[in-house]
Amino acid sequence: CQELQGYFWWRESQDFGDMLSFTLTAFVELMDHGIVSWDTFSVAFIKKIASYVNKFASDISILQRSLAILESMVLNSHDLYQKVAQEITIGQLIPHLQGTDQEIQTYTIAVINALFLKAPDDKRQEMANILAQKQLRSIILTHVIRAQRAINNEMAHQLYVLQVLTFNLLEDRMMTKMDPQDQAQRDIIFELRRIAFDAESEPNNSSGSMEKRKSMYTRDYKKLGFINHVNPAMDFTQTPPGMLALDNMLYFAKHHQDAYIRVRLPLVMEVFAVACL
């Protein structure tokens, strides 16, 4: 391993071109045979490989091999994951997704997946928050999925893996039942009703009786499509989808209010049609 790294340093100092690319290719092929342990590589070597990725102007072939090496380091060694994670961030990888070379994009997403897969739980949630940002989603959608070329099989696989890793983080919420006695959770349901029927709602100081208000709430929850009109919190005690369904409804209602109101209109008409029978 020391001889391998020594040869790399010599080649890197001699020529930053095709020969370095060939050296990295040979390195990848050699490591794929499992003859040398990944744990034997020095921090300096990792930093050098990472530097090729962090330089956006790097030669395409060198960048491709460097991304492949980093992915293998992360997947094959916990210690190397920690060292690579210190050198490479998702923010530094994003520019490679904005390029036109699909192979580079594929290796870039593969590195993101590897970092995501090997990250401890707290770090994984942090990465998920970054991946959930609109900017990154828009970049993948614009430059990868909607690019003017067919998506190859490997890219499709990496996108699938990324999606699965992201969805897996939602499992806890999906398997969490709502507590009908939790006022904070009940307030979310009240908020869903307020957003949908705000213009039609009675003012807070309405002189209407409590029974009238309960009747109005029950009618509104029925219009919104809840199964349990009297106590809609019970709709979220079944897992799955559990609290994930409520999270999604609230996000939709808050961030796409017009569409949310349009969705409830057909439900209102259905309720009226049933009432007229």
Image (cartoon, rainbow, N blue to C red):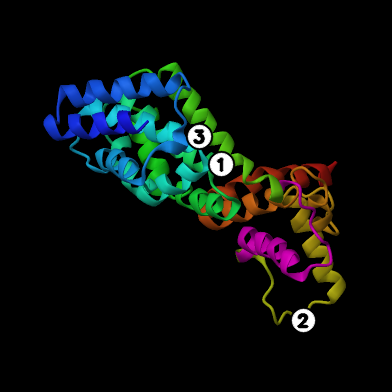
For marks 3 and 1, give the one nearer the viewer. Answer: 3
- Name the spot of residue 236 as percent of width and height, x first: 78, 51
For marks 3 and 2, give the one nearer the viewer. Answer: 3
Seen in the picture, residue 132 relative to 117 is either above or below; the reply is below
Cα gap from disc 3 to disc 1, whole angstroms: 18 Å
Q: Which mark is residue 166?
A: 1
**Which sits earlier in the primary sequence, circle 1 or circle 2?**
1
Cα gap from disc 1 to disc 2, whole angstroms: 49 Å
Seen in the picture, residue 175 relative to 4 is either above or below; the reply is below
**In the rendered structure, which amino acid carries the disc numbered 1?**
Thr
Q: Which residue is mark 2?
A: 207
Q: Please give the range of residues in magenta.
A: 174-198
Q: In which image quadrant can residue 203 be found?
A: bottom right
Front-most of residues 144 and 236: 144
Determine whether, in the image, residue 77 is placed left or right of residue 203.
Answer: left
Look at the numbered disc 1 and give the secondary structure of its residue: helix
Q: Which mark is residue 75?
A: 3
Residue 195 highlighted magenta (yes or no): yes
- Name the spot of residue 60 as percent of width and height, x first: 22, 27
Look at 39% across and 38% down and name the residue there. Answer: 41
Look at 74% across and 44% down and name the residue there. Answer: 241
Front-most of residues 53 and 271: 53
**In the rendered structure, which amino acid carries the disc numbered 3?**
Leu
Residue 78 highlighted magenta (yes or no): no
**In the rendered structure, which amino acid carries the disc numbered 2?**
Ser
**Which sits earlier in the primary sequence, circle 3 or circle 2?**
3
Q: Which mark is residue 7?
A: none
Look at the numbered disc 2 and give the secondary structure of its residue: loop
Cα gap from disc 3 to disc 2, whole angstroms: 65 Å
Q: In which image quadrant can residue 215 be found?
A: bottom right
